Image: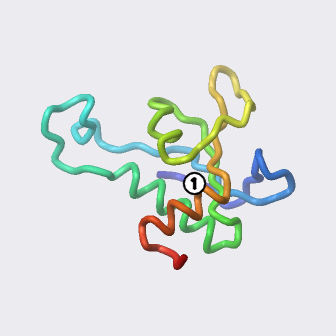
Amino acid sequence: MLFRVDALSAIAPGQRAVFIDRLATAPRNRDQLVTDPQFRNGGSGLLTYAIAVSYSLGFMGRVNLFPVANQSFYTDKGFESTGIQEEDDSLFEIPSDAAIELLRARGLIDG
């Protein structure tokens, strides 16, 4: 995963966000491609890490990205389309309330 900490939120104007430039896991670990993946939840773990970094920097967990594939992976975690297009890709962002709930559910913050 490659991410930047100098981005702006698309759904909370004027607020900061982490921008994930690239997030990828090994194809041999995707249950859509193999019947018995060796490792599971690598992508979810990386995404959670970026959200935690955003939270720790005071960005309230806001993270945005252009999903390369499998948009449902991101929407299932609370990401929303922002309506911003770049060529054929749509920018998605997780709002702060959904990000904080995800971090709480994983026991990373109190609440």
Q: Is residue 36 above or below residue 18?
A: above
The reply, left or right, for residue 17 in relation to residue 52 is: right
Q: Residue furthest left?
A: 36
Q: Residue furthest front?
A: 111
**In the depicted view, which residue is nearer to us: 27 or 108?**
108
> What colouring style does the render use?
rainbow
Query: Tag 1: Cα neighbours inside 10 Å, few (<14), some, or many (≥20)?
Result: some
Q: Residue furthest top?
A: 88
Residue 106 percent across, percent down from the top left = 42, 66
Q: Residue furthest bottom?
A: 110
Residue 85 percent across, percent down from the top left = 72, 27
Q: How many marks?
A: 1
Quarter holding residue 27:
top left
The reply, left or right, for residue 43 in relation to residue 109 is: left
Identify the residue position indicated by label 1 in the image: 3
Q: Residue sitting at 51 percent across and 60 percent down?
A: 102
Image quadrant containing the C terminus: bottom right
**In the depicted view, which residue is nearer to us: 104 or 57?**
104
Q: Residue sitting at 77 percent across and 53 percent down?
A: 8
The kind of secondary structure element at disc 1 is: strand
Residue 75 percent across, percent down from the top left = 53, 39
**In the depicted view, which residue is nearer to us: 5 or 33?**
33
Q: Is residue 36 above or below residue 3?
A: above
Q: Residue sitting at 67 percent across and 59 percent down?
A: 96
- For the residue marked with disc 1, what is the amino acid? Phe
Residue 16 percent across, percent down from the top left = 76, 60
Q: Residue sitting at 39 percent across and 57 percent down?
A: 45
